[in-house]
Image (tube, rainbow, N blue to C red):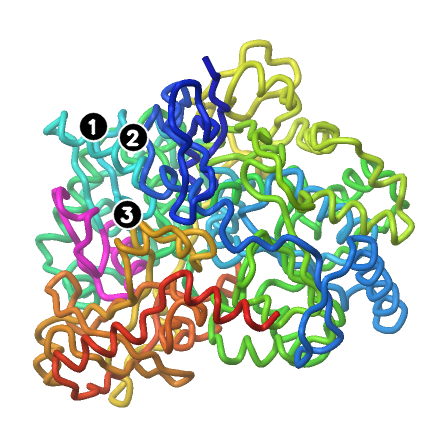
């Protein structure tokens, strides 16, 4: 009997365990994909503590994408108007190393930028930090987690003194009241929602509150759905706190003994009486009071949030205001309670642990702290002062740097900024100005490859061995189980080889990813994210383990650990910090010219920019084309019929797509999914519309909301259907279109 390989799903941050079997099994026919390629078989791992055997459609179909449209050889061109030519790895890597040397000599190290991904394994992240921040001496490494989780990171650090979600998935089955805000959990983190939903159905006393301008799969079974206006989250949260204070529903002992700053927070709450909050949020006063009553009367409140909170010009303030409610009521560090950010990518947590944003260092350290820099320099055996004390460029700042010709090398790995960045036409214009762009990816074509000078074929899921950490801090060993017929390389190996060619041979003297991981966990010792007790060998033999797992821990738990159970925090005085934020609202509110608010989000089947899912027929069939949700009241004003094509315009760009008239969206708000780039449909890029305003603390862009107008295209339903058929590109024709640019 063939034993399955145990690994982790490479999509969202839930971190579902998978078991993978080879295409050919004794006595059974070979499993093949739609193109006839032998295909690995995937099922849920019942022993994985986070998912318990459950798997969604993305995880179940992941193997169908492995052979399709793969980048198989390094390619180079001197300018963007030339075709790519195939080259050897030596030629490609020599070219990158030479360009880095030239730019450092002419402009300094801060002209080098690397933009990475939550798709990385921890070893990939770690070696990138050592190369960029250590050896080259610039902190210009950022990742697409900047567009995803940086507001949560900043909120945790400012409130608790360290990053790290305090709760765990076991709390989904322990809570009295689940407060979901800015998250369509049922579609974006389905296995987490399945666990919560089962608990909710089984226990009638458990309350489920969902805050979302849309009625989604998540809101269907909610005890209370608050369809607030986009941008009024802080109004709502402060309004709930106002009522809790008025009703004496707060934990005075916890506040006095374990927190600081409550008096200042309480002063802010005076400005948020229920009548005013209800009006600003567009909800009823009695619903606001019901939400506050559910929270105040529950002994264990668990809050969950995702992009609807983080992707905001007030992102950090929103996160901290959620945490305020937990501090106010003592809902922290105990079963069923705590603030819990749901990460969007499979190893976004591992990236945070490894220092994978431009202001942080491995082991939950920050670049501004001289002691933190010194600790990392010692492990890396670098001279004191090698690591810059200045935070590097965040994701959008890199785009501005390209605009201003301050960036000489732009190295993109495992992500697709030509689709995912805000204000995408401006982004593309900046990418065209780049003097030297490296695109390191498993797939070709991608939208970003169009702007590259060098393409490097990267090994992906199942083709390299490494570690990933999910949203609840469970660390999983992900082994290589698939051999390639072409020479793709692990991301960390590519970074290390360039480092050696730059003259840092000793720093990158690793024979395996296991050795890389061993060095990394040394930098977590005695930190909140202590993983010094973990290794490839231990994780391979014992299965997934949740951190903290210090070196001395002999019997680590698979899951169920919570942070701050002793009610002490890694701050100077050991206390958690209240914040005092007033609501500012949207960075770009609606006005007479652009009277509607566009909000964006994911769909159940698709993943990010479709580099994988756009190549899987079952998922393409589920979600064949983009669309615009609009409320009947707004559709009637604009004389828009169901299925009619409309032009959606903002101050930056436009998109054309069919209208879906539905009461699931609030009046004055429209919704468009974020998955379609130029490779998959014409005029359907949501980020042609969005703006680049960022949270001043986390530097995360406000991708969730912008002001728009709608222009009906006045076509009959029959004409609209024809246009939809012509405009929607299936995966094969789209790939052929860009593939011809080789």
Q: Residue at x 66, y 46 (%)?
A: 486
Q: Label 3, on which residue?
A: 187
Q: Main secondary structure of the magenta part?
A: loop
Q: Which residues are magenta?
A: 211-240
The residue tagged 1 is 199
Kind of element beneath mark 2: helix
* Picture coordinates of residue 136, whole percent (x, y): 82, 55
Residue beneath label 2, please? 172
Residue at screen point 78% across, 45% down: 496
| Gap between marks 3 and 2 measured at Cα | 17 Å
Q: Is residue 201 above or below residue 370?
A: above
Nearer to the camera, 614 or 607 = 614
Examine the rendering and report whether any part of residue 252 can be seen. Answer: no
Residue at the far top: name it: 554
Relative to 256, is 131 above or below? below
On screen, residue 607 above or below 200: below
Image point (28%, 47%), residue name: 187
| Up/down of 279 relative to 382, above or below | below
Label 3: few (<14), some (14–19) or many (≥20) C-alpha neighbours in 10 Å? some
Residue occupying the point 47% across, 64% down: 735
Disc 3, SS:
helix
Which numbered mark, 3 or 2, is in the foreground of this view?
3
């Amino acid at each position: 009997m063939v034993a399955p390989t145990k690994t982790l799903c490479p999509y969202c941050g839930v971190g579902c365990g998978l078991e993978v079997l080879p295409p050919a099994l004794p006595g059974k026919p070979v499993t093949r994909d739609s193109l006839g390629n032998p295909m690995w078989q995937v099922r849920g791992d019942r022993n994985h503590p986070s998912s318990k055997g459950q798997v969604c459609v993305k995880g179940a179909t992941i193997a169908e994408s492995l052979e399709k449209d793969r980048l198989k050889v390094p390619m180079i061109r001197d300018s963007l108007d030339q075709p790519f030519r195939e080259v050897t790895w030596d030629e490609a890597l020599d070219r990158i190393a030479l360009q880095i040397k030239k730019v450092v000599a002419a402009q300094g190290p801060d002209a080098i930028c690397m933009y990475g991904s939550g798709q990385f394994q921890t070893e990939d992240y770690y070696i990138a930090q050592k190369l960029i921040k250590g050896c080259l001496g610039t902190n210009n490494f950022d990742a697409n987690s900047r567009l995803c989780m940086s507001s949560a990171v900043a909120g945790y650090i400012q409130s608790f003194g360290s990053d790290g979600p305090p709760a765990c998935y076991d709390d989904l089955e322990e809570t009295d009241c689940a407060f979901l805000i800015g998250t369509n959990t049922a579609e974006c983190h389905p296995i987490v929602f399945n666990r919560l939903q089962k608990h909710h159905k089984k226990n009638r006393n458990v309350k489920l509150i969902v805050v979302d301008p849309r009625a989604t799969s998540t809101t269907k079974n909610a005890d209370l759905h608050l369809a607030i206006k986009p941008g009024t989250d802080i109004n709502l949260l402060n309004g709930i706190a106002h009522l809790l204070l008025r009703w004496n529903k707060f934990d005075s002992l916890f506040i006095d003994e374990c927190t600081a700053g409550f008096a200042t927070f309480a002063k802010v709450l005076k400005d948020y009486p229920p009548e005013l909050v209800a009006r600003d949020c567009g909800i009823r006063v009695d619903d606001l009071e019901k939400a506050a009553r559910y929270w105040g009367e529950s002994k264990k409140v668990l809050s969950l949030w995702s992009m609807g909170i983080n992707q905001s010009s007030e992102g950090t303030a929103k996160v901290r205001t959620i945490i305020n409610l937990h501090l106010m009521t003592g809902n922290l560090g105990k079963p069923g309670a705590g603030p819990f950010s749901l990460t969007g990518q499979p190893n976004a947590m591992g990236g945070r642990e490894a220092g994978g944003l431009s202001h942080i260092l491995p082991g939950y350290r920050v670049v501004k702290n001289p002691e933190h820099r010194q600790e990392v320099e010692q492990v890396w055996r670098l001279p004191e002062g090698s690591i810059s004390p200045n935070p590097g460029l965040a994701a959008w700042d890199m785009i501005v740097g390209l605009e201003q010709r301050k960036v000489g090398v732009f190295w993109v790995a495992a992500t697709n900024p030509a689709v995912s960045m805000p204000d995408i036409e401006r982004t593309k214009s900046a990418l065209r100005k780049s003097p030297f762009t490296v695109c390191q990816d498993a797939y070709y074509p991608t939208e970003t490859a169009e702007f590259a000078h060098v393409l490097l074929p990267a090994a992906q899921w199942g083709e390299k061995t490494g570690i990933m950490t999910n949203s609840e801090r469970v660390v999983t060993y992900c082994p290589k189980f698939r051999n390639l017929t072409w020479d793709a390389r692990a991301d960390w190996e590519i970074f290390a080889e360039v480092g050696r060619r730059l003259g840092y041979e000793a720093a990158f003297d690793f024979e395996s990813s296991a050795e890389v991981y061993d060095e990394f966990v040394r930098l977590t010792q005695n930190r909140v994210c202590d993983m010094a007790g973990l290794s490839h060998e231990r994780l391979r033999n014992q299965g997934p383990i949740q951190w903290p797992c210090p070196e001395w821990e002999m019997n680590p738990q698979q899951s169920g650990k919570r942070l701050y159970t002793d009610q002490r925090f890694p701050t100077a005085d050991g206390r958690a910090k209240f914040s005092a934020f007033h609501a500012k609202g949207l960075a770009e509110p609606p006005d007479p010219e652009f009277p509607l608010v566009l909000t964006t989000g994911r769909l159940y089947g698709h993943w990010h920019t479709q580099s994988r899912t756009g190549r899987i027929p079952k998922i393409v069939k589920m979600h064949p084309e983009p669309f615009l949700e609009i409320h009947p009241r707004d559709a009637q004003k604009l004389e828009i019929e169901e299925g009619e094509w409309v032009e959606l315009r903002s101050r930056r760009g436009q998109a054309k797509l069919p209208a879906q008239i539905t009461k699931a969206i609030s009046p004055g708000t429209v919704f468009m999914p974020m998955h379609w780039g130029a490779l998959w449909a014409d005029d359907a890029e949501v980020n042609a519309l969005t703006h680049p305003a960022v949270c001043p603390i986390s530097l995360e862009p406000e991708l969730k909301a912008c002001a728009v107008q709608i222009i009906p295209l006045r076509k009959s339903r029959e004409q609209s259907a024809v246009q939809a058929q012509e405009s929607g590109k299936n995966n094969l024709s789209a790939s052929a279109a860009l593939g011809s640019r080789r």
